Image: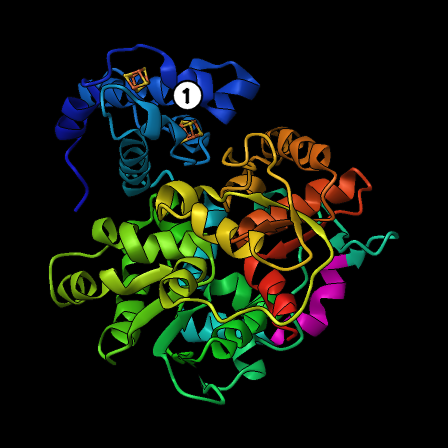
Amino acid sequence: MSTPLQELKAAALKCTRCGQCLTICPVFGKTGEESNSSRGKLFILRALAEGSVQPTEHLMELAARCTLCMRCKSICPSGVDTTGIILELRRHLAEQGRLPLAKRLAFKAVSRGRLFDMVMSKASPFQSLLFRRTSQGTGVVARLPIPAAGLNLRRLVPELAAKPLRKLVPAVSKPAGATRARVALFPGCMLSYVYVDAGKALVDVLVANGVEVHLPDALQCCGTPLYSSGDVAGAASLAEANVRALASSGYDAVVTGCATCGSALLKEYEHVLQEGRSLTAWQDMKGKVMDVSDFLLRLGPKPYSHTVPLTATYHDACHLVRGMGVSKQPRSLIRSIPGLRFTEMNRADVCCGCAGTFSATHYGLSQQILADKVDDIMATGADVVVTGCSACKMQILDGIAHKNARTRVLHTAELLARAYGL
Ligand code: SF4
Ligand code: SF4
């Protein structure tokens, strides 16, 4: 059940209009429009609750102009749950039928778990019908602009892998020596169907650390694209399926390899799941949800076997640093790799502008935000930029390709796999 508008209005009234959130908002920073800031969105929410504006498509468009980076929430001196209120605003508008048709269709497809899996697993050979490789070999771009699908002739799109992750690793991967822990891996859509090498690296690194890794067959999308767009009912059906697959088998931990999925499993399901068995099962399980870097540090990582003579920098995904409270852990793992030089970038925890579907629906704005991130990365002179979020990886790869830079973008697990000689 969505939070009643009057209740949201009361929460929004805690805002003292101090304007601090405007100073750090990446969207407001590029547009200078008050409605793009959280303060502006709280004002819209109040107007909606008072009936002075109607729940139109335009209002949904204003509500969508936010990357949900949570920076405003983290600095608000009045403790306003800005992002929570923005999400509820989107939910209200979606319930009033204001979700764009393209998103409704896409979300219906994602919600059909088995069908979605079949399409994502088998579509690789047909990509060339829609996409062509760039002449620089940096990836693929659309042959034709399809604005409703967020495709234009400039955006670098990651290719679907020829085989999904579950065809590359067994359902249960066992370590050679003693088993130190038994975990379920939640890879998420990107590591399952797109960046499968990173997904495999994640499994290999865990196994090299004495971990038995289970890849439950029934896992589905974490639901964040739906939840963050306001389709909470659709997200709930995915969340229920995931909790069913993860909660009952007595795993020591549920390890996530994607910041967005991890944040969903750790926090968002509280707002997505309805009262009932799934919510109870999730409450029992959530203490076991950990990003892979957090899990490895708690376990005690085995010593690295190889030097990695690279200069690396690290980008904090919003869902990791503010969603899961993970920022020191990956840095600690990376800094201790022999031969590697770590250099911190400026504003490492500022959003890269991806925000999932935002980068498709608001490509120009997303690119403006990304340009600052790419400048900060390039200023370090690093050979690789490491991140724990596949969506950030996709976004940064796009920005780096447009600068014709050679900086590589790796998932944390891919760098660790090198240090273990995997
Ligand atoms: S920082 Fe908080 S109190 Fe200040 S304007 Fe933004 S939402 Fe309102
Ligand atoms: S969550 Fe981020 S993008 Fe959205 S209003 Fe807050 S600071 Fe701006």
What quarter of the picture does the C terminus occupy? bottom right
Q: Which residues are magenta?
A: 122-131
Q: Is residue 148 magenta?
A: no
Mark 1 CB in 8 Å range of ligand 2?
Answer: yes
Nearest the viewer among 347 and 301 is 301
Quarter where residue 274 is shown: bottom left
Q: Residue 212: x and y, percent? A: 41, 82
Looking at the image, in which quadrant does ligand 1 appear? top left
Please give left or right for residue 145 compared with residue 365 in the image: right
The residue lying at 37 percent from left, 26 percent from top is 72
Task: Name above or below for residue 291 compared with residue 101.
Answer: below
Q: Residue 397: x and y, percent? A: 68, 48
- Main SS of residues in magenta: helix
Task: Name above or below for residue 201 compared with residue 216.
Answer: above
The residue lying at 25 percent from left, 30 percent from top is 81
Looking at the image, the residue that sits furthest to the right is: 135
Quarter where residue 133 is shown: bottom right
Task: Name above or below for residue 19 compared with residue 375.
Answer: above
Nearest the viewer among 337 and 316 is 337
Q: Is residue 124 magenta?
A: yes
Residue 105 showing in the rendered view: no
Nearest the viewer among 124 and 215 is 215
Q: Residue 157: x and y, percent? A: 68, 53
The residue lying at 41 percent from left, 66 percent from top is 300
Which residue does the numbered mark 1 point to in the structure image? 37
Q: Residue 288: x and y, percent? A: 27, 65
Mark 1: few, some, or many residues within 10 Å (few <14, many ≥20)?
Answer: many
The residue lying at 36 percent from left, 75 percent from top is 183
Nearest the viewer among 311 and 38 is 311
